[in-house]
Each structure stands twice: as structure tokens, then as C-alpha cells.
Image: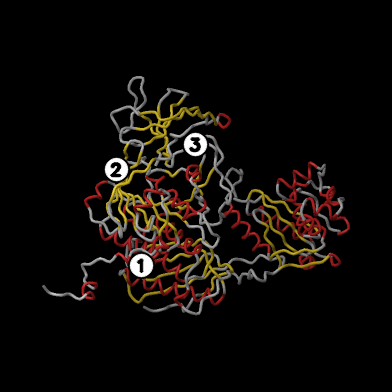
Amino acid sequence: MTRSLNSLSLLTGEAPSSPRNPVFHESRLNNLRAVWIAVRLLKITGDPLGTLERCPEADRTVLEALARWARQFTPFVSLAPPQEFLMEVNGSLKLFGGLEVIKKALRAEFERRQITAYLCAAPTALAALWLVRHRSHDVCLPEKLVGSLSALPLGVTGWPENIQSSLQSMGLQTIGDCLRLPRDGFARRIGRQYLHQLDQSLGAYDSWPEFRSPQRLSSVLEFADEIADPAVLAHAGSNLIEDLGKALRKRQIGVASFDIAFQHLHRPATTVCIKLSGPTQDRGRFLRLFLDKVERVVLPAPVIALALRTGRVEATIERNATLFQDSAQPGFEEAIDGLIERLRGRFGATRIHGIDLVEEHRPEAAWTKSTDLLSRTSRDALLVSPWAHRRPLWILPDPLPLPVTGNSLPRYRDQEPLQPKSGPERIEAGWWSGEEVSRDYYVAANSNGERLWIYRDRCADRNWFLHGIFG
Amino acid sequence: MTTVSVEKLINHPHIWQGADSQPSHTIHSTGFKELDNHLPGGGWPTATLTEIILESYGIGELSLLMPALARLNRPQNSEQAAGWILWVSPPFIPYAPALSRHGIDLTRMLFVHAAPTHRDSLWAMEQALRTGSCAAVLAWVQSADETALRRLQLAAEEGCCWAVLFRSKAALQQRSPAALRLQLLREGETTRIEILKCRGGRPGVIRIARSDAGDTEWW
């Protein structure tokens, strides 16, 4: 086994700013010389008819690609996802020959990439953002800023619905209306952060996180000979991951995913993708997930090299390490994090899920799968519907039709008809969404002692169905 | 007649000593008085494997566990972390409104649906037990050999996690290293619980009345 490339090499990008001290652009009211261009992308997936559904990840990729390209005009670009970015071009105006030239170059690039976008320039970033959302004209002079902003409707601010509707119920329609209100009253009734945003748009202060292009790490481990022994490959992969962990730790960064490609001679490589629940530099977690995958990967040919390539590198704050190895007991939440990752790695993300309640009368729609497992906080107050005591602990994914003989109740896994225990409970709902149900539910038992939740469909053929089981 | 010293007798491997049974902190009340009275320590031994054998679903098998699960999942004092409950290959969908009514915190539920094989289900169960990240792991596995069961029992002890395995009647033919082994049957309006094996306790039969299933008043 020989190492062709020693340690991990940097592929692209630059070090991300640490979450402890992000890089901000600062400008002050008394120094209003900044010129911001806000860019709002409308159709950014590149389909000319705009028929494709928007995908946040694809949008983000396009946005980042454009932001990287835009950095030829300015050292400071900031992303405002999902569909906007900002660039501060004051220092570049003279070099490129004025604002119009830069805007023209941007427009030409959008056309080349088949992207529909709007541009707007203003002395502050937030003002530029709000103006571009309303497709307004550029505001070049700071003294005209208040006048231009005042005419904008409240919708451009992107404030939450309830804030906007409460402002509208007070008769405030534009940003100008808000600016005319007494400051302390506005802060008290609406919220201090919204007052801050108004100040920010007028240039009281201006701070925006800088965009830095994402960074990836990669490394290749070449073998002197072709290797087919899975144990040797697992060991070699573990070495790569060990190095990755060290490199990440040295730079205080983490990754949320990485690929390991098993390269074959004269064949496309076999790649295993490893996804974590969030950016980390924990070697142990990388290794466990890798070994789970490698155990079950089918290699079509012997392997000549292993190549590791990480996803985007992100700044992380790791827990303090303990002095004594044996006391390094992971926290409860971290352990469940690791478990969910491993289960997802083995069974695929769709088979691992949580559940949640939905406020809905139709029994089959009163619950939902939730895939976002960790960010949810446990509720203090129980959200229990008043009918819950009549609901079974098991529900069938699809109601099961039950056979009926004569005029009696239906049968289920039994010769005798079911015995009704209680009911009926009538559920009629869903007509407004075209999924109308009209059913009479009963609790019934068969002679095996199984307690069942059955219903008779009141619509079409008045058939009987099994919907739940009292487990 | 030969005299045998007491010390020799105590160290005799065939003599089982009741004193070193379960430590009391891993016992959780079942919520059913009759069952608590019968089980050693007065509740489910939760850092072990519990095997529940039943022929058909719908005889109160889940509601039997609900009081204990709710307590594990929603601890009384604030120092304890809320426990996660993992469900591995349940036969139907656990119904959220009913779980919520039993006091279960739905945000701490995790489901592995349709694991492709029994081995996968056992693997998931063992991993969850060993990491100690869950308070309870419920699994529906039809075939598991004695080695697999022993691994689960050891993993449950290691991770201090309650493993509950639901199995069909065929499992009665098999030896089991589980600390507690029950068979559930339906008898009229009661659920009949046959304790087949109970570490530190004795076998027996208990009947508990069903409280669910809407027999109680309706409106």
C-alpha cells in the first residue's frame, strides 16, 4: 500500500468564517458611500417555461454559482437565500466604468445562463433588497432613500404574516407609514427587531455576513496491487477517515457528508455516500457509518485505489474533549443522532421517521410522518383531541374491505360475524378538499378476542371496512 | 452423614441466591396493580429483554405497555432526559392521536418501517439498545434464534434500555434467555397474562381488565 498524495489536499474554496467571528460588512450613517446591488432571481432552475418545481438545494447551488461569479466585480458578496444576493460595488465603480456597466455585465450573464433576474442599486443593502422585491428603480443618492422606501408596500419586508396583518389592521400600508410612527410605540407594539430593520434600511448601521465559497477536502489512497479482500479495504478506508478527522480537527471545521470511491481498473468506480445529520468532525461517527456501508457494498472487481471526497466544509463548534478517554460518554441527544444516522445509512432515509398529530377529522389524515426528527422540541401541553379515547392504537395503512353475509355485521378472521361493542360514531368530512368521507364507525370484537375498529361507508356501496385495531 | 460447611453450600453453583436479582432502579411500574404485585421489584424490569408472545393483534398488547412507556418517555422530574422510543417493524401504523392520549410524547418516537429482513430488524434493535440512546425499543420479529436473543439481552443490559420483543406462538417451542417472558391471551373482557418465565420471580397467571376499546360510556 502506498500513499500517492500525502494527507488531505484542499480542492477548492477558502476557509469558512467561524461562527464565533463571522466577517461582516460595516458601514455607518455618517459614511453613506456604499453602493449595494441587490439581485433577485426569479426563474433559476434554468427551465425556459418556468414549469419545473422549485428545489431549495438546486436554487442554492445556482445562487452560490452566481455569487462566486459576481465576485469578479467586488470583494464583498452576501447571500440572502432563497433567491437573492447582494454585492457592494462602491470601490469597483471607477475601475469598471460605473454602475450601469456592472449592471449590464450582470444582465448579460443572466441571459447567458437563461436566468430571469431583477437588479436594483441603493445606498444600503436592506433598502436595495426591499427595492428589488418591488422592482423599483435604482436609488443613487442617499437623500432620496427615504422617499423611495416610503412608497414601498409592507410586503417587501418579508416580515411574518401576523406582523404584517396587524400593521395593516392599524391602517399602515407602506414602509413610509411605519417610518412616521413614534419609535418607542412601534418597538413596543410590533417588536424591536422590526424597528432595527427600518433603521438598517436607512443606513443607521449595516452588517451583512460575507459569502465565502464552500470548501471540500479530498484524498486518494492508491494501492500497489489490486485488492479484493474486504477486510483490507475496510482498514484502508478507516485510515483515510482517520486522516480526514485529523485534518478537520486541525482546521476546526466539520463535514456533513462524504463519498468514498472504490476505484477499479477499466471500470467505473463504486461509490458509497455517507451522510451525517449535521456537520461534525467526529471520527468515530464517520467510521461507524463507513463500516456499516462497506459491510454490504458489492464490489464488481478488485480495487486499485480509494478516493475520499467530502461535501461542503462548514465551521463547527465541537464539545470540549474530556481529559480521560473512558469518561467520554456522549450525551443522550448525540447518541440518538448517531443512531438515526446509522439506521438511515442502512435502511434509507424514507424508512426512518417520526410521527406527529394533524388537526383533522378524517382518521387516516389525523397523523403524519415527520422526517425532521431532531429539531422538534417536546411539547409540554398534550394536544389531545376529545375523541382520542375512542381511537385504536393501531391503524391500518389502507382500510381493509370486510366480507359480509346477509344483513349481519361483517366477519374478520373468523366464521362468526363481529359483535358490536359500541357505536356508531359518524365521521363526515373532507368534502371541501374533494376527499369526502362519510362513515359510521363501530368498535367490534370477534370470537378470538380481537377488538377492532370498523366502519360502514355511507357513500357508494355501503361496504364494511376494518380501519384500526385496539392493540 | 457428612457435614457440609455453610460456606461451601453458599458457593455451590446449583444454588440460586435471590439476593443478587435486579437492581431496583431499573424497575418501572406497569401501571396495573395485579401485574406489579406479581413481578419481582413491582414492575417491568427495564434494563432487560422482555418477550411477549401473542397469537393475534388487538388483544390489548400495546395498552399493556402504555403506562410504562409514557413514564419512560415523559419523565416526572426535570433532571431526567425524555426517553426516545424506537419501534422496529410494527405490524400496523401506531396511531398518533391514541398514543398522544396515553401520554406519549410524539416528538420522541422513532420508527423503522418495513426493515427488509428479520436480521435487519434484529440489527436495528441491537444497535439501538447498545448505544443507550433510547429508553425503550419495541420490535416485532417472527424468527430469532437463541443467540440473537442472548445478544439482545446483553445489549439491553449494556445500554440500560428496555427491549420488548413481540413474537408469535411458534416461539413457545424455543428456549429464551429473556428476563421476562409473557404470553397474552384474550378471555372475555379481560386480558390473560401468562408469565412463562420471570427472572427472580415465579411463573403465574394474571388477568387484567381492558380499559381501552371504547367499552366505557360514549357521549
Q: Position of residue A104 (x, y in %)?
A: 74, 56
Residue behind mark 3: A363
Locate residue A424, reporting x and y percent.
46, 27
Query: Which sits earlier in the primary sequence, circle 1 or circle 3?
Result: 1
Q: Residue furthest right?
A: A143
Looking at the rendered structure, the kind of residue marked 1 is Leu
Q: Amino acid at mark 2?
A: Glu
Q: Position of residue A301 (x, y in %)?
A: 32, 64
Asked if disc 1 and disc 2 are in contact, CB closer than 8 Å, the reply is no
Label 1 residue SS: loop
Q: Position of residue B144 (x, y in %)?
A: 28, 54
What label does residue A265 carry, if any? 1
Relative vertical location of residue A372 with respect to residue A445 in this rendering, above or below: below
Q: Secondary structure at mark 3?
A: helix
Q: Is residue B16 visible?
A: yes
What distance separates the C-alpha of mark 1 from that of mark 3?
Answer: 56 Å
Q: Which residue is mark 2?
A: B55
Badge 1: how crowded within 10 Å, few (<14), some, or many (20+)? few
Q: Amino acid at mark 3?
A: Pro
Separation of marks 1 and 2 at Cα, in angstroms: 55 Å
Q: Is residue A143 above or below residue B95?
A: below
- Quarter containing the N terminus of chain A: bottom left
Comparing marks 2 and 3, which lies closer to the viewer? 2
Q: CA distance from mark 2 to mark 3?
A: 27 Å
Check chain identity for marks 1 and 3: say if they share one.
Answer: yes
Residue name at image x 88 percent, y 58 percent: A143
Applied colour scheme? secondary structure
